[in-house]
Image (cartoon, rainbow, N blue to C red):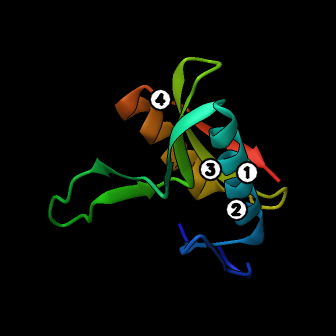
Amino acid sequence: MAKINHTKIIIDGIEFASISEGNRYRELKLMERSGDIKDLVCHPKFLLIPKKKPLRELKYTGDFEYWDNKRGMLVLEDVKNKWNAKDAKFSVIRRVFYFITGRIIEVVII
C-alpha cells in the first residue's frame, strides 16, 4: 500500500516510505542491540491470495517483522500516523491477514 504525501528517507541503505517509519526503524535497531528483539526484517512480504483469473493476487508488505524476546513471539508491525491509522483498505488487509495466518498486524501510531 503506497503512502501518499510522505517524505521518503534512506537509513542504512534501506528506503522507508516516511520519516516516521524511518524513526521506528531506528528505535527497533536500538532494541535489537539491547537484546529486547532479534531477527529484525524490514518490509516483509506476504502473498495473501494467489492470482486466479480474472482477479489479481493480493499481497501485503509490512513495515517490520521481528522476534520479541520479552513476549516470546513473532511481531509484525505497520507504522501509521493519526490520519491514516483507520484506512479502510488496510483494515480489510489486516483482517484477511489474520484470517489466513492467525497473526495480528500490530499498528504503531507515530
Q: Estimate the x, y position of residue 24 in percent, counting from the top left.
A: 73, 54
Check the image and name the residue furthest to the left: 53
Which element carries disc 2, helix, strand or loop? helix
Which image quarter: residue 107?
Answer: top right
- Residues at circles 1 and 2 in contact by the CB criterion of under 8 Å: no
Q: Amino acid at mark 3?
A: Asp
What whole-number distance in Å separates the C-alpha atoms at marks 3 and 4?
13 Å
Q: Secondary structure at mark 1?
A: loop
- Which numbered dot is residue 26? none
Crowding at mark 1 (Cα within 10 Å: few <14, some 14-19, many 20+) = few
Q: Is residue 82 left or right of residue 3?
A: right
User: What residue is pinned by disc 3?
Assistant: 78
Q: Tell me how far mark 1 sits from mark 3, CA to CA.
A: 12 Å
Considering only vertical position in the picture, is 104 above or below 108? Answer: above
Tell me the quarter of the image containing the C terminus: bottom right
**Residue that badge 1 annotates:** 86
Type of amino acid at the residue the image marks with label 2: Glu
Percent coordinates x, y for residue 101 in the rendering: 37, 31
Which quarter of the figure has residue 21? bottom right
Whole-number angstrom distance, CA of label 1 to CA of label 2: 17 Å
Measured in 3D between alpha carbons, the distance from the residue under mark 2 to the one under mark 4, in whole angstroms, is 21 Å
Q: Which numbered mark, 1 or 2, is in the foreground of this view?
A: 2
Q: Which residue is mark 4?
A: 103
Choose mark 3 or mark 2, whichever is in front: 2
Give the residue drawn at x 76%, y 70%. Answer: 19
